[in-house]
């Protein structure tokens, strides 16, 4: 019993000693890369040597506004060709994709209208020649005092009227596609070989669309027959939202890219900014004229549009490599504080990129030292 009490007493003496020893144990050294309670990270010197920082200061720059667009024919160099004459199509003379000259025949239409126009011209021509002969004769008679002045003047008026009717009949034949050789033959009073009207190209360009086939019945001034366009220059039509409208103006240079040609850029300029905003999309249309010498851009093609604003802006820019994203996709940068210390700082990015830089609207001040290389060491430190 005495031994058991002695052992118990010994235990009571040892336990406080162990507790004291445990409390007096020296604390372990803190990790030099662990962030402290203020969000500041301290790196060892060998890692700091791998960090590259730049000082940000207000910079004058030009924004690049990005949007999408659709390729269209240049409306100033393209036209839809309507049938100038009614009747069935006798022959189509040009295939789609072929270059055409202004006035080149595209199709022949077998039409009684053409025969009626030829007959009308012959009739008015005969009347004009006869009226002119009478007017010349009356002029001689008036000089010899054989008729009154009024009769002579009436003959002159009749001749001018008849010649005007003949000229109108001639222009009708031109409108129906008669060529110069046929017209000269008609004026000479000889029969012509043409048996129908001709649809001609109104402008020089490429026949990009054929809408008729042989035998199809056409209605004058109503049936669309062809589309001719000069595809060496195209329009790109894009939409600009209200928030970007202040940065876009006529004359701004534009780069156009397409998924069809990922390694190519097409360059143009804005030549029109619409005065209306679409009430549904809240966007304004812009038109870009783009040279297309190789005919790679095609009607209806979707493209990416980068508009380089000519208006100067001023603010803070940081390289794209300096901006990281947190788990909530919020952008942040690392800012150097000196003495091997760095701090993660959430920033607000501008809507548009400036070449290979981001515009920073909030989170940084002029003079801040922003990390552009070596963020890996700092990211690792954040995870410890």
Image (spheres, rainbow, N blue to C red):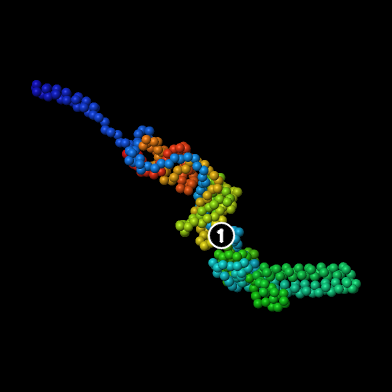
Percent from the top left, x then y, of residue 42? 35, 36
Residue, far right: 145
Judging by the rendered image, the residue that carries numbered circle 1 is: 233
Foreground pick, 192 / 324: 324
Label 1: how many Cα within 10 Å (few below 14, some 14–19, many 20+): many
Q: Quadrant of residue 233?
A: bottom right
Seen in the image, is 375 located left or right of residue 188?
left
Q: Does 62 sit above or below residue 129?
A: above
Q: How many marks?
A: 1
Q: Residue at x 30, y 34 (%)?
A: 30
Q: Residue at x 81, y 68 (%)?
A: 157
User: In terms of secondary structure, where does tag 1 sit?
Assistant: strand
| Extreme residue toward the bottom, this view | 190
> Who is closer to the viewer here, 55 or 260?
55
Q: Position of residue 191 (x, y in %)?
A: 69, 78
The quadrant where residue 100 appears: bottom right
Q: Is residue 256 visible?
A: yes
Looking at the image, is 239 positioned above or below residue 42?
below
Q: Position of residue 124 (x, y in %)?
A: 75, 72
Nearer to us in this view, 382 or 229: 382
Residue furthest out toward the top: 2
User: Would residue 143 appear left or right of 2 to someone viewing this image?
Assistant: right
Residue shown at 70%/74% (left/top)? 184
- Give the residue at x 87% y 73%: 141
- Expressed as whole percent of the image width and height from the top left, the position of residue 28 reads 26, 33
Query: Does residue 375 appear in the picture of this structure?
Result: no
For residue 125, side relative to residue 319 (left or right): right
Quadrant in the picture for the C terminus: top left
Residue 215 sits in quarter: bottom right
- Image quarter (top left, top right, bottom left or bottom right) of the N terminus: top left
Q: Nearer the viewer, residue 277 or 263?
A: 263
């Amino acid at each position: 019993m005495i031994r058991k009490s002695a052992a118990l007493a010994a235990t009571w003496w040892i336990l406080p000693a162990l507790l004291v020893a445990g409390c007096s144990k020296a604390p372990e050294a803190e990790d030099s890369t662990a962030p402290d309670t203020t969000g500041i990270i301290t790196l060892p010197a060998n890692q700091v040597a791998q960090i590259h920082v730049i000082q940000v200061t207000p910079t004058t720059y030009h924004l690049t506004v990005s949007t999408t667009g659709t390729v269209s024919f240049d409306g100033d160099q393209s036209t839809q060709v309507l049938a100038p004459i009614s009747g069935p199509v006798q022959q189509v003379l040009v295939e789609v994709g072929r270059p055409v000259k202004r006035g080149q025949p595209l199709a022949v239409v077998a039409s009684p209208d053409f025969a009626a126009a030829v007959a009308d011209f012959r009739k008015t021509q005969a009347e004009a020649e006869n009226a002119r002969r009478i007017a010349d004769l009356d002029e001689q008679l008036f000089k010899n005092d054989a008729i009154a002045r009024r009769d002579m003047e009436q003959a002159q008026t009749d001749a001018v009227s008849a010649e005007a009717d003949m000229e109108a009949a001639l222009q009708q034949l031109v409108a129906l596609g008669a060529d110069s050789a046929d017209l000269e033959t008609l004026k000479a009073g000889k029969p012509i070989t043409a048996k129908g009207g001709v649809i001609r190209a109104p402008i020089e360009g490429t026949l990009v669309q054929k809408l008729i086939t042989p035998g199809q019945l056409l209605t004058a001034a109503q049936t669309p027959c062809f589309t001719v366009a000069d595809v060496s220059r195209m329009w790109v039509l894009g939409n600009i939202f209200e928030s970007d409208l202040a940065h876009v103006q006529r004359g701004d240079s534009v780069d156009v890219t397409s998924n069809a040609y990922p390694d190519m850029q097409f360059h143009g300029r804005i030549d029109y900014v619409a005065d209306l905003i679409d009430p549904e999309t809240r966007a304004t249309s812009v038109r870009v004229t783009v040279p297309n010498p190789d005919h790679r851009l095609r009607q209806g093609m979707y493209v990416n549009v980068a508009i380089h604003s000519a208006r100067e802006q001023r603010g803070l820019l940081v390289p794209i490599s300096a901006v990281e994203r947190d788990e909530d996709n919020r952008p942040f940068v690392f800012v150097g504080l000196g003495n091997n210390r760095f701090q993660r700082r959430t920033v607000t990015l501008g809507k548009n990129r400036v070449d290979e830089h981001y515009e920073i609207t909030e989170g940084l001040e002029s003079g801040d030292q922003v990390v552009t290389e070596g963020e890996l060491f700092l990211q690792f430190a954040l995870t410890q």
